[in-house]
Amino acid sequence: MNSFDPSAIAVRSAHFIGGEYVETQGPTLEVARPSDGEVYASLPIGDERLVAHAVENAWYAWRKSGWATMAPRERARILRRFADLVAADAATLAPLEALGSTRPVRDVFAWDVPYTAEGIRFYAEFADKIGGQVAATDHAHLGMMIAEPYGVIGAIAPWNFPLVMASWKAAPALAAGNAVVLKPSEMTPFSALRLAELAIEAGVPAGVFNVIQGDGRTTGDALVRHPLVGKVTFTGSTRTGAAIMAACAHSGTKPVTLELGGKSPQIVFADAPRIDDVAQRIATAVTINAGQVCVAGTRLIVERAIAEPLAERIEKILRGLSAGATWSPRATLPPIISNPQAQRIDAIVRSTLEAGAQARCGAARAETDAAGAGGAYYAPTILENVTSESAAVSEEIFGPVLTLQAFDSEEEALALAGHADYGLAAGVHTADLGRALRFVRTLETGTVWVNRYGRTSDFIIPTGGYKRSGIGKDLGKEAYEANLRFKSVLIDVNG
Ligand code: NAD
């Protein structure tokens, strides 16, 4: 699917609780299409009462529906059916996702939807694999750690990959036998509703997967603080993550998984194989989803000998991208999520230029075709003559902005690659395996990619940050286990 008519897509401005759409009165938020700025829906803001209703309903469904107590293979079977329904729904899900987000419909159809379905399948397979452990005790006793779900998982998602992020939260939680109350971003609220609807259609009991709508301050905060939420899982900015961690501490010392911001370096040595491939890799890692990716490789740290030829090649690729609506078949660079966000990108670029940096390309709002006239687009940008103190080097920009710093030695490259706050991901590009391994060992980041950048569909490899980039992991066995708590049991065999 390459394009669609945005005016033909209908959305349900509602919550999804207890297996049905729930409409509420009260304050609303306007929801705009990033591609052309047009307001297409008004979103209800779930207040404390609505959130309490959703969580209590989920808790009751969790206790009464048998979801946690059924044969785990049956739970797996239902989740596999859920995955099949998601995959089969691509023609509906893809335009729904692309309409209100920055994800081009072509990519949602080809990647986000099948990837979401496969991720659900991956977690379905865990449902009957992890039950706990038997402890090494004397034979007069039997000691066990029984794996048990928390009950209701409160999940809060960001706007950059709405469907994928929702599934990273919901799938392991459901597979482990929990109920989920998910709050998507108020900027991209609709595809999660369809996801929950498909889960119920597949056989997940009504009330076990719910979606509530609203902003962070009202709805998100009430969800985090509700006493029946057993655990919180959050993906978003470091600042919000810290607020959520504090709220969890003050509302029942709840465990929390936090997937937060990043400012990831791409370290390129002169011996890196195939400079054209490296240039393409660096360009893609900073422009995919217009740079609105937590692991975007935004800091190019390159050995001086190849700095110029590499920069030339990257510049050529960036200049060749054409901005346009998520439904435009010709566009190769999607919009920025909102005008305030595009202004923020521009402000960081301007202040870096004022401090002495030079722009090789970009550094301005991007020209677009007519379809995107009211949208927010930013031209892919390369900034040179920056230092580690430059705003564009130290702050997460969440836009297509690459900074370039040259180095002369391995030590210098390592020093430049480190970031005071963030430690999400890094790329190392070199033909020298020993050097690559030295970087793998030394970099303080949750992920290191060598001679590639970005994830594959190996769901088994977890993702998560060091330092202020987060706590805990999404994906992998780790995300499944994070949705379980372990009860210790000791039995006196002769008692
Ligand atoms: P954000 O922190 O502004 O919002 C994320 C979600 O939190 C939204 O649903 C929002 O409504 C909610 N929220 C806001 N304040 C809240 C509060 N006080 N209590 C509860 N919920 C609240 O982030 P964003 O702008 O939507 O997303 C971009 C950020 O997400 C970037 O920093 C990016 O790096 C990060 N991100 C990280 C990963 C990862 O895996 N590490 C993945 C994707 C995005």
Image: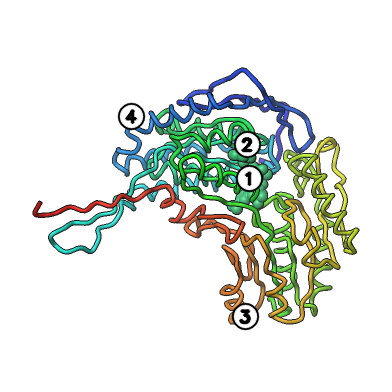
Q: Which mark is residue 150?
A: none
x, y percent for residue 86? 51, 38
Question: N-terminal of the two: label 4 or label 2?
Answer: 4
Q: Amino acid at mark 3?
A: Arg
Q: Gap between marks 1 and 4, in whole Å?
A: 34 Å
Q: Gap between marks 1 and 3, in whole Å?
A: 37 Å
Position of residue 166 in the picture relative to residue 287 (left or right): left
Question: N-terminal of the two: label 1 or label 3?
Answer: 1
Q: Gap between marks 3 and 2, in whole Å?
A: 44 Å
Question: N-terminal of the two: label 4 or label 3?
Answer: 4
Q: Which residue is mark 4?
A: 64
Q: Residues within 10 Å of mark 2 (few under 14, many from 20)?
A: some
- How many badges with numbers are in the image? 4
Answer whether labels 1 and 2 touch (C-beta < 8 Å).
yes
Question: N-terminal of the two: label 1 or label 2?
Answer: 2
Q: Ligand 1 is in which quadrant of the figure?
A: top right
Label 3 element class = helix
x, y percent for residue 349? 84, 55
x, y percent for residue 266? 69, 67
Label 1 beta carbon less than 8 Å to ligand 1 = yes
Q: Amino acid at mark 2?
A: Gly
Q: Which residue is mark 1?
A: 240
Q: Amino acid at mark 4?
A: Lys
Question: N-terminal of the two: label 1 or label 4?
Answer: 4
Q: Amino acid at mark 1?
A: Thr
Q: Which residue is mark 3?
A: 435
Q: Residues within 10 Å of mark 4 (few under 14, many from 20)?
A: few
